[in-house]
Image (cartoon, rainbow, N blue to C red):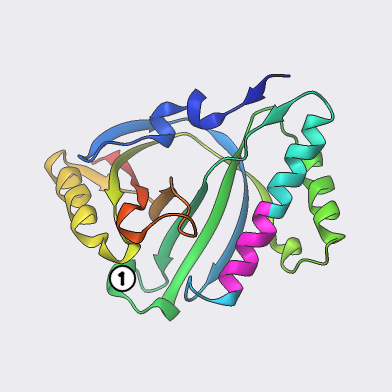
Amino acid sequence: MQKTDLAKEQKQYYRAKATPEIVTIAAANFITIEGDGDPNSALFNAKVKALYATAYNIKKINKLQDKDFKVANLEGFWWTESGAQVNAAPMHEWQWKLRIQLPDFVSKNDFTQAAALAGNKKLAHLDELHFEHFPGTLAVQILHTGSYHDELPTIEKLLAYIKLHNLDICGPHHELYITDPSKTAMEKLRTILRLDVKSK
């Protein structure tokens, strides 16, 4: 049985350079969950757990249909209600949406069944999960290596590139987590930072 690996099939999406670049992001389906506040909180971890439990159940359901896939990397959108830059605002003001991309063959019904199976484990927040379609977009991205708390200089490179190319930002701060913080030294963490853009 062939296993779909989105990181290998969509190299432009799951890889980035240490210098800013413009990329075209294709439309895709995701499972998502939203929240607010400190990402170091028990609430954040519980929502991540619900997201992953459902993603792995979707994988199991599709594997029974001979359509196996590797669960994709976690992603996060970050913003504040005031519009202030996330890195400049206290964590209790942060708003976030987490998501995991799904292969095209995964259906909304697969998602519904998977969430129900996760419910057998009595996990919290399963009713807050959504199956969402995101349209394609143009974005500017860069690879950040190191702690999440040290992203500001890398973000400034992104912003300078966007200004230089006369583009407007049209979405929240977007991160794609290449490495697992529970298994990787802080200074070796790799995160793709991405901002949706449009021409002025």
- Say which quadrant the C terminus sits in: top left
Give the prevailing secondary structure in the magenta stretch.
Answer: helix
Q: Quadrant of residue 11?
A: top left
**Residue 159 visible in the snapshot:** yes
128 falls in the magenta region: no
Residue at 35% in and 48% down: 190
Q: Magenta part of the protein: which range?
A: 43-52
Q: Position of residue 112 (x, y in %)?
A: 81, 47
Q: Secondary structure at mark 1?
A: loop
In the visual, does 159 lie left or right of 25? left
| Residue marked by disc 1 | 84
Kindly give the residue lying farthest to the right in the view shown: 120
The residue at 72%/33% (across/down) is 106
Report x, y in % for residue 104.
Answer: 65, 28
Q: As drawn, is 183 to the left or to the right of 124?
A: left
Residue drawn where x is 56% and y is 50% of the image: 99
Q: Amino acid type of disc 1?
A: Ala
Image x and y of residue 196, in percent: 36, 44
Q: Would you say 22 lies left or right of 37 here? A: left
Q: Is residue 189 above or below residue 1?
A: below
Check the image and name the residue furthest to the top: 1
Instruction: Give the camera-side residue of 89 and 181.
Output: 181
Question: Is residue 45 found inside the magenta-colored segment of the image?
Answer: yes
Decide: is 60 above or below 104: below
Q: Where residue 168 sits in the image (x, y, percent)?
A: 26, 47
Which residue corresponds to the image point at 37% horizontal and 49% vertical from the top-left? 191
Judging depth in this view, the residue of 45 and 36 nearest the camera is 45
Looking at the figure, which quarter contains the N terminus? top right
> Image height check: is 128 above or below 198?
below
Is residue 85 something that shows in the picture?
no
Residue 170 or residue 79, whichever sits in front: 79
